Image: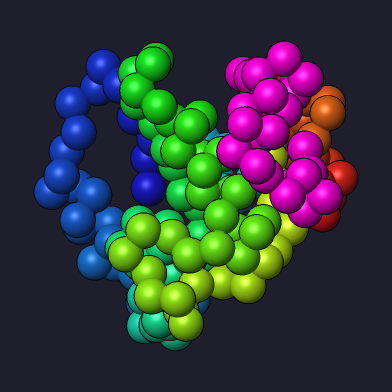
Amino acid sequence: MTLQTATDKIDADAIRAEFETLTAEPVQSVETEENSGTGLKPLKAVRFSDIEAKEVAWLWYQFLALGTFNLLEGEEGLGKTFLALALLCAVAAGRGLPGVSDGEHVEASNVLIISAEDSLCYVLKPRLESMNANCERIIAIEEPFTFDAEGIFRLK
């Protein structure tokens, strides 16, 4: 498959034709003139026929799935940090979440905060204290890191 710049017109028919030429064999990395010498590895691809479907486990049904990436985004001042802290306080204390019955909420658990924006001592700690947070269960990363292989290893 050929890579195109954002200014190139995408030829959907050509892309479709290339996909149709794939055999039933697993997709494999191929060194081509286009990627040789770049030091870049091709993206790993998988056929959906080889993927096992799984049920979603929920922290907060229909809002926050467990074991997945959840993104809370929005304009400044809408209450994103307040919501995130309220949720982590509930998890750290083992309290229920809105709309979750008493018997279905998670038990008290440790929570990890990774904040690139708010100060731990000037912003987050005072807010957590005002929410009567169980700060023994709340952990924060104190240094910047990247989500590359080394950063993920260090995070683990």
Stretch in magenta: 117-140
Q: Is residue 15 above or below residue 75?
A: below
Find residue 28 and report its image quarter: bottom right
| Viewer-proximal residue among 43 and 31 | 43
Residue displayed at 39% across by 15% down: 76
Above or below for 37 versus 107: above
Q: Where does the image place residue 56, in percent across and percent down from the top left? A: 41, 75
Q: Residue at x 56, y 71 (%)?
A: 106
Residue at image coords 20%, 33% = 10
Q: Is residue 140 left or right of residue 38?
A: right
Q: Quadrant of the C terminus?
A: bottom right
Whole-percent x, y for residue 84 in the image:
51, 40
- Residue, x 74% and y 58% (percent of image)? 110
In the rendered structure, the answer to whether residue 75 lies left or right of residue 29 reads left
Does residue 154 appear in the picture of this structure? yes
Q: Is residue 96 left or right of residue 94?
A: left
Is residue 131 rendered magenta in the image?
yes
Q: Would residue 47 appear left or right of 110 to someone viewing this image?
A: left
Above or below, 25 relative to 38: below
User: Residue 124: within the magenta?
Assistant: yes
Q: Give the camera-side residue of 12 and 125.
A: 125
Residue extending furthest toward the left: 13
Q: Which of 32 and 108 lies nearest the eye of the viewer?
A: 108
